[in-house]
Amino acid sequence: MRTGAILIEDLYNELEFWVPYYRLLEAGVELTIVGPKAGIAYQSKHGIPVTSQAAARDLNGTEFDLVVIPGGYAPDRMRRDTGMVNLVRDAYHGGKLIAFICHAGWLAISAGILQGKKVTGFFAIKDDLVNAGAEYLDQPVVRDGNLISSRTPDDLPDFCRTIVSALDE
C-alpha cells in the first residue's frame, strides 16, 4: 500500500487540494491530511473546510511515499510552521516524492530543497524559486528526481498523471 501526506492550512486552493486528493485515492494511495495541528478545520480561500487528521510535528516525512503541497495562500502559512517545514525536508532527504503546485513552491523554498533543481510554479513566485537556487521552467509540470511541480489549476491533469506515474515506478 502506497501512502501519502497531503498538507493543509487556511486559505488553501480548493482545486489544488481536492483534485489530487481524489485522484490519489482512486489510485489506491492511503492519504493522511496533515496540518500544523491535528483535528483542526482549515478553511479554503472560499470557506470550504478540511479537517486535518495529524499534526506535522508528530510525523516524519519518511513515513510516506509522497507529500503533496497544494497552493493558494496556504503555503505561506505552512512555511511558518516548523513541523510542516521539517516534514517536507525529511521526506525529500528520505528520497520520497514531493509534489507541489502554484504557490506551494514557497514551502519547498523554506524546506531548502530546491538548490540546483528544475521546477515550475505560479509565475508570481518565479523570482522566489530562482533565488532559492532552482531553474524555473514555464511548463505544465516539471519532474526533477523526486520533485514534481506544476503552475496552476489548469495543469492539474498533467500534475496528477505525473504523480501517479512516479508512484508506480
Image: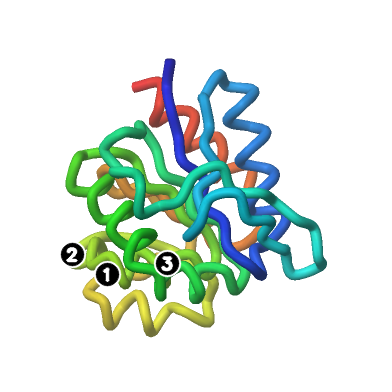
Disc 3 residue type? Gly
Q: Which mark is residue 105?
A: 3
The answer to which of marks 3 and 1 sits earlier in the sequence is: 3
The answer to which of marks 3 and 2 sits earlier in the sequence is: 3
| 153 vs 124: above or below | above
User: Viewer-nearest of labels 3 and 1?
Assistant: 3
- Asked if the residues shown at circle 3 and circle 1 are in contact, with their CB atoms under 8 angstroms apart, the answer is yes
Distance (Cα) linking label 1 and label 2: 5 Å
Tell me residue 163's x, y (percent): 47, 36
Q: Which mark is residue 134?
A: 1
* SS state under label 2: loop
Q: Residue 116 carries which label?
A: 2
- Asked if the residues shown at circle 1 and circle 2 are in contact, with their CB atoms under 8 angstroms apart, the answer is yes
Q: Which residue is drawn at 26% across and 38% down?
A: 62
Disc 1 residue type? Ala
Is 61 or 112 nearer to us in this picture? Answer: 61
